[in-house]
Amino acid sequence: MVNKPRIVKDFEKLAPEIQEQIKLNYPYGFHRNLIQYKNAEGKFVSALPFETEDRYYLVRMTLVEAKQIIEDDDDYNDRGELKDSIKEDYEEKYGDLDNLSITDGAPDGMDDDDDDMDESDGDSGGDDED
C-alpha cells in the first residue's frame, strides 16, 4: 500500500473540484461522517475524511459547521440532500474516478440524533499542507 500525503484543510480552502467530489461522495450531508483525531497539539479535532487517488484529506469542521455548510449550499435541497440535477452533473464530471463511492440511498440505520458528537470543537489546529 502506498502512503498518500495527508492534507488537513478547511472546506472553504479546498479547490472547487475537490469540494464537488466531496459533495458527490457525501450526497446526504457531512455531519454523520465526521471523525475525531488528535492534532499535533494534542487537541481533538473533528474532520470529514475524503480520499482521492493520490491524497487523503481530512476536512476540518465541527458538527455545527458541517450542518451549516450544507444549509448554506445551493447544491443541497431543504432536506440536506444533494439535488438530483447537481448529482447528475457531478457524476458525469467525476463518475470515472475510482476513489468515489457514490451511494444511491441514505445510510442504513442512521438517524439525526447527533448528541454523541461534540458540537463545540474549539481550535481546529493549524496542520495545513498544500
Image (cartoon, rainbow, N blue to C red):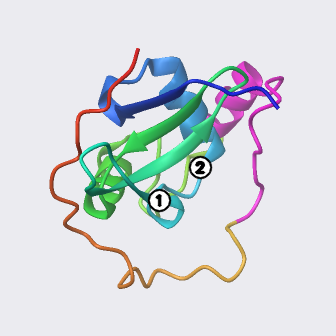
Q: Is residue 17 left or right of residue 1?
A: left
Vertical order, 105 against 7 (above or below): below
Q: Residue at the spot x=48%, y=60% of the render?
A: 35
Which residues fall within the magenta stretch?
Answer: 85-105
Q: How many residues crowd mark 1 within 10 Å: few (<14), some (14–19), many (20+)? A: some
- The residue at which mark 2 appears reads as 26
Q: Amino acid at mark 1?
A: Leu
Q: Residue at the spot x=33%, y=47% of the render?
A: 39
Q: Is residue 125 left or right of residue 45?
A: left
- In the figure, residue 120 lies in which quadrant? bottom left
Vertical order, 89 against 73 (above or below): above
Vertical order, 40 against 127 (above or below): below
Per the image, label 1 sits on a secondary structure element best described as loop
Circle nearer the viewer, 2 or 1 = 1
- The residue at which mark 1 appears reads as 34
Q: How many residues crowd mark 2 within 10 Å: few (<14), some (14–19), many (20+)? A: many
Percent across and percent down for residue 86 are 59, 35
Per the image, label 2 sits on a secondary structure element best described as loop
